[in-house]
Amino acid sequence: MDSAAFKDKTLLFDDPRLHLSGVGRFVVRVLSYTFLLFLTGAAITLALSDIRGLQVLGVLLLLFLLDRAWHAGRGDRSIRDLRNQDPVNLAKCVSSRTFGILERAFERSGIKHSNVLLEVFQDLLHLPEVVTGFERLEISLEEFRTRLQATLKESSTDSHAERLKKLEELVVGAFEHAGRMHHSFIEPADVFAAFPFLSDPAVAKLLNIFSLKAADMEGVILFGELSRKLARLSPSSLGSFGKLMRPGVRHRIMNRAWTARPTPMLDSYSTDFTDLARAGAAGFLVGHKAELERLLDVLARPLNPNALLVGEAGAGKETLVAHFAALLIKDEVPSALFDKRLVGLDIAELVAGAAPEELHARLQRIVGEIIEAGNIILYLPDIHNFLKTSSSAYISVADALVPILRNNAFSVIGATYPREFAASIEPRSDLTGIFEVIRVEEISESEATTILVYDAMILEGQFKVRTTLGAIKNAVTLAKKYLREKLLPTSAEELLKSALALASKRGDKVLRKEDVIKAVEARVNVPVHEATKEEAEKLLNLEKIIHERMVDQEEAVKAVADALRAYRSGLARKGGPIATFLFVGPTGVGKTELAKTLARVEFGSENAMVRFDMTEYQEVASLRRFIGATDGSVGGTLTRAVTEKPYCVVLLDEFEKANPDILDLFLQLLDDGRLTDAIGRTVSFENTIIIATSNAHSDLINTALRQGQPMMEIAEYLKSRLTDVFRPELVNRFSKIVVFKNLSPDDLRKIAGLQLKELGKTLEEQGIALEADASAIDLLVKLGYEPQFGARPLRRVIEEKIRAPLSEEILKGNASRGTTLTVRGEGDAFRFEVKS
Amino acid sequence: MPLAFIYFIERALFRVGDFFRHWYMDASRTMFHWLVSLLESLDRTLALRVTVRRFFEPLYQDWSVVGRILGVVFRSIRSLIAIFLYAGICLIWAIIYIVWVSLPLALLFYGLSGI
């Protein structure tokens, strides 16, 4: 019974026993037990009496006692029985076990002057379901109990009426939970789940200390409920029929109305989903309610009763179809679909070893059988494959089916992927006209959690490892965030399985949330765990680490370091990329270098940087290349890159040169962290750092620098002039605009040192040591200093004047393993000395 | 203390009323659900509803006269079997129900009259 039936009704909790004194309650208990004992004795005595009338009355009394025993532990009325009452006294639907807890707590709180709610909580901690719940929540019961007892010692000044009021608030919350869980009575588990909704500050403080949230507490109750229910179900009844294909399932040729005909040819190339459903494998479905309703509506209508399910792999298309088969056999479908068979045609078997003529004949016969049978709903998985059956002599199953489907001869459910739909099906108006397209979207995180709770129950048996709720929730959240190549729940199920396998290998008995984090880190090579002490230190000194490879550019380095710290401390803005930067400044001053450093520090490798040269996207047509073609024939470079590497630095070089239409794409992306590609798939950029670089107005910087203006002033002026190049709303969407300043000769000297150090590392691998004295560095700066080109000329000088001659020395055999090469600057040339 | 005694007596009387409520209201509801579930599960095999709806359709799409006649014949036999079976089940259910309903009152009556 849903608690919605009690909406707008007055809910109260009033039991006369709570108005009695402690002695009074004791007397009632003693009297009740004594009277029951007396009745039992009387019933037996009467039943054994010689007087017939007394014997009959004894039997009646025994029936009364049996009824009491049968109903022992239940409340006076079930929740359902109370739906017509107003006001509703919830004391009537409280189970005796629950009432016992409430009554004892109430009594104790009166004697000890303590908080009645905390007394209730203390009693709940002894219940096995709560003990298991705490274990699943990864909370130490002992620690919680100690903290609770410490809080209980604080005296409460609540009057009798106030304590009753508090109990009422608790019971009303428990009643709402019981309604949601379809319980007949308010059970102790419902009371446990009601605690986070209470307004009592002591309770709120206690729950806060242990981060106990309503969803978590409901989650563990659900876990307990499901484990009890699942014990009665076959584990194989979860998921779609894909897991259930097995020989020996009895095939029913006849339908119940005796109107259908056998379909031997169809049967040899297909799987009968209704047979499988009848074999006891229920199609288990969580979520997809709207899609299912739409499917039933479409199939039940007289015209064009054909549905096309379009969704990514793992979105739940087959699960939906399997559930539909389960509904068919239970007659839980519109009357037009009564007594139908759902049959999935296997294209691979159909075309295997068949010449075009043979294939054509098979098709004709199958279609003929379906029409004659009159009760077949045909399921065509991967329907796009039916369009390319034979390349040699083009015979497409779809071509054969379309004219028949147009006559509404039988119903078809097709399934395909968005890309294939856009590429092969959407352009064909003859097909799209016949089918009603139903988009099957990824299920929500809460729905995936429910599925994973079921999965965990089954997997616990297999791996002998107990799964905590935290592990399950983490598996869903992290899979959604980091494992985007598959959809929920598949991605989360795989993650949970791999975490369980690792835990089982280690000999762990419990799978905790940290274990799931480790499993995901092993797969994506990105730090996901909360920052450790050592890592926190590294984050706090991030500027120093970046400066090991970057010279100057303090503002830029601080901006990226701040962004990383916010991300790793969990304070980054939700619902957008980790950070978005617009790096502005002349060429060769370190914009790309900083992006690379960022990729290495945050995502473990420079390979985690996806680079786009925006000069390649100057035409309107290049939009197609960027986010893909609408017909699905070309995938988007940007969307594909981020789908493959969801945790990366996206570097957009020379951003100002991109076509304005492409720049408009970034308005949404920078704001929401999402981008929808040409075929309607949404790609998340929430784990990316987006860096756009621009040389716009760098001439202004050079001129201003030549005039001796301070960099601070130049930066402010430059930012104000950016709207000449970009639309103001685009500029505003960047989390930070960083102006890179020109490099001074001193900066260049440091860069020269760094680059020579890098060269030295390469030589070290060959056993050659490189030494460069101050004269060499001076000469490098002299030859490589061109303010308008930054550090680029310096790199060129090193390449030409140092690396190239060194290569020659190595090839000539002058510099070999164990030698030391010293570079000196003399005049305008470098001199190399080799020492062994 | 008197309140405790009043409460005890009130509860004792409530339990007597509760016994009759369980016996008549709750048990009637449960027994009716049993009957409906049993008939529904039988109808998945005997398919009275579906058979009646397709009564005049030919057997297995055999649109010949023989097919049509056989359809009516076989469906009539099946429908009759289903009707008799369902009626039998309903009758047995009704007998059990009447016995159930009259049991406490009969016991009370015979008990009191037999003393």
Image: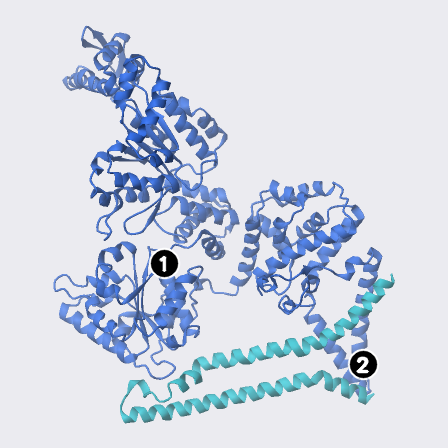
Chain colours: A blue, B cyan
User: What amino acid does circle 2 point to?
Assistant: Leu
Residue furthest top in the image: A827
Residue B44 in the image, given as x and y percentages of width and height:
44, 79
Circle 1 — which element? loop
The earlier-in-sequence mark between 2 and 1 is: 2
Name the quadrant of the C terminus of chain A.
top left
Residue A263 lies, with reference to residue A488, above or below; the image says: below
Question: Is residue A36 something one can see in this rendering?
Answer: no
Residue A23 lies, with reference to residue A251, above or below; the image says: above
Residue A683 lies, with reference to residue A709, above or below; the image says: below
Looking at this view, is A639 or A648 the one in front? A639
- Mark number, residue A190: none
Residue under the point 37% across and 59% down? A316
- How many other residues sit within 10 Å of disc 1, few (<14), some (14-19) or many (≥20)? many
Q: Tell me the subunit letter for badge 2.
A: A
Residue B3 in the image, given as x and y percentages of width and height:
84, 63
Q: Quadrant of residue A689?
A: top left
A608 vs A73, left or right, is left
Residue A370 in the image, given as x and y percentages of width and height:
27, 76
Residue furthest left in the image: A393
A655 vs A479, left or right, is left
- How many other residues sit within 10 Å of disc 2, few (<14), some (14-19) or many (≥20)? many
Name the quadrant of the N terminus of chain A.
bottom right
Looking at this view, is A207 or A237 the one in front? A207
- Mark number, residue A46: 2
- Mark number, residue A440: 1
The residues tagged by marks 2 and 1 sit, at their Cα atoms, a distance apart of 68 Å
User: What amino acid does circle 1 point to?
Assistant: Val
Q: Tell me the subunit letter for badge 1.
A: A
Count the numbered circles shown.
2
